[in-house]
Image: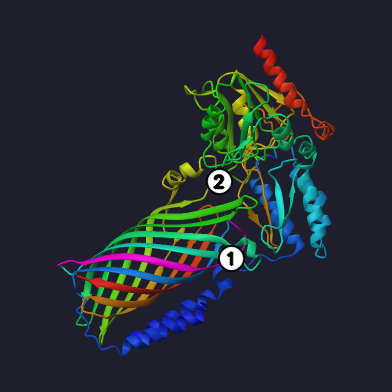
Amino acid sequence: MNIQKQLAVILILMGCMQVGSIKAQDWVNPNQVTISLGSVQGLVKDELYSPLNYKSDGGTLGLNYQKLTKKRHLFAVDIELQTLEIKTNVSEFFIADQVKLNIEIAYLISISSSKNSRLFVGPDLHSNGALINFEDDFTLSNSGTFVSHRGLGAQVLHRSRFKKNTIHIHGKLPLVGKVYRSPYNLFTKDLNDEQLFSFLYTNGELSTVHNYFNPSVATTISRPLFRNIHFTAGYELNYLYSSVNKSITNYQGRFIFATIFKF
Amino acid sequence: MSNKYFLFLFIGIGVLLISCEQVILGSDEPNNPEHNFEILWNDFDKHYALFEVKNINWDSLYTVYRPQVTPSTSDDELWQLITEMLDHLDDEHVKIRIQAEEPHNYVEFASGAEKNLRALEEFSIELIAGAYVETLYQKDDFYSYGKLYNENIGYIHAIAMLGANPSSIYNAISELGDLDAIIMDVRNNIGGADQYSAEFARTFSDGRHFLYTVETRNGPNYDDFDAPLKVFSKPHQPNNFTKPVVLLTDTFTISAAEIFTMHMKSFSHVTHIGDTTAGAHSDVGAARFLPNGWTYEYSIMKYLMPDGTSLEGVGIAPDIYKQNSSANIEAERDIVLEYAIEFLNTKKIN
């Protein structure tokens, strides 16, 4: 499905939500689990991997748990997996896979609230990883690169209600941590299959926003379908630039559709 | 602005940005002969590991070949120039490919490969299966095995150092019974993974021996390398085969098959017979991509023997030199294998 069609689908879905008649449940339910699916389009250039520009296209699956504390602060755990295909304008043969796995724990403090809106700010601990893998089984030619970040970030979340709907605007920015990149020649003798996992956890470089800049902004709209089940749709922009061991730029736009179970 | 219009505007901006590739990523690399040559030459300059051990003056190759590339150079001419330049590296892990539109259809050049191609005419597994081995069994991994006619000698041929289960060789040997000796044949072996070679050779290990060091290039200078990693043979295990073994190689024993050769040569009960190996030891680096759709790859490591020498481009010499000719094969004789059988029988008598 191309971008225009996806945009049309989400606009129609949002329009439908405006005429829904199910009574909105109060958004202060203490616990909620969200299962999300999405469609991702993006752009990638990893100079360690290839001098060429790539377009990415794929899907995302997410699982989120949130708990609203008695003080109305928000504790959240997020896991997200993306699987994408990246390709150039040059050759169909250059198609490769990209896999992303993001895990985060956030604690957001409610800093202001009014009748219909609330603003949260707080830190998160996160582990974000992206792997590109190119393999040609026939020639046995292969390549791969990864960028991963683990550290401390900041988040801002604004929730507001209108009619039966809730709008969320959610911003995230990793602040400090360690960034992990493929080695200079992409492989070393240590980086074989058995040791890949340990390599990913032991060869990091200290990072701040100057060498790992990865802001994201998401805006979603949710609406109750049943008493404890809400439907959410939204869009997220994510930009990554890292200069560690040659630059990588990755820009993504994601349509997200989610079901929220409140309890 | 109401919230819902903000949401639509946000989505619109996001989608619009994805179509602005140049703004986000910068211009894509131009596809012209000069730029393609420059990308390739510079990439080798910054990443290829063997300029020093092979005593290659890469700059002087630039001064020879770069002026011959002009904006009007055709793809065929560029291919000719680049392959000619890369052939000076005499390194079979240096490869360049043109991918055709049909899947699995490509043209490939491997530097220095031509000199080893004669070995393809000097070996025939069909001849061995028909004339020398009772029944040649095939494993899921890339090796076959059987027992020689009228001898209590096992024969194993590995065509590649690849597969899921290198330890299966233990079962293969025990299936052949209580053998007096084994001929381990890695002639016409295309290589594979060093780890597989090490595990495969474990079957014959008589102990842990220091074999070689590996250093991976890690910077823009020709002498930028990681700390040397020492590689040892696997330790002896009780069920290892430690009776006499002959290892057969030829000039088409390449890469991981040469690593296997290094392991085997360290064991005291192994005798190496045949021809010198290809001399391409480094792991192949990652696939690289050119704006004209070509891919290429190169060596990123240097393997040094315990005495500090490199056998890249030199190969591993046998203990006893013996070579087939294509005429031998046409006459349905494998004189290298026959010599190995005779050698083992003489050893048995002595």
Residue at x 47% of width, y 45% of height: A196
Residue annotated with mark 1: A87
Image quadrant in which you'd find residue A114: bottom left
Q: CA distance from mark 1 to mark 2?
A: 22 Å
Name the side, left or right, on which A4 lies relative to B314: left
Q: Give the chain letter at badge 1.
A: A
Q: Position of residue B313 (x, y in %)?
A: 73, 35
- The residue lying toward the viewer, choosing from B298 and A20, is A20
Q: Is residue A159 above or below residue A67?
A: below
Residue annotated with mark 2: A187
**Residue A229 colored magenta?**
no
Q: Is residue B100 above or below residue B153?
A: below
Part of the protein shown in magenta: A48-70
Q: Nearer the viewer, mark 1 or mark 2?
A: 1
Q: Position of residue A191 (x, y in %)?
A: 51, 43
Amino acid type indicated by mark 1: Lys
Amino acid type indicated by mark 2: Phe
Single out the residue that lies furthest toward the top: B350
Secondary structure under badge 2? Answer: loop
Secondary structure under badge 1? Answer: strand
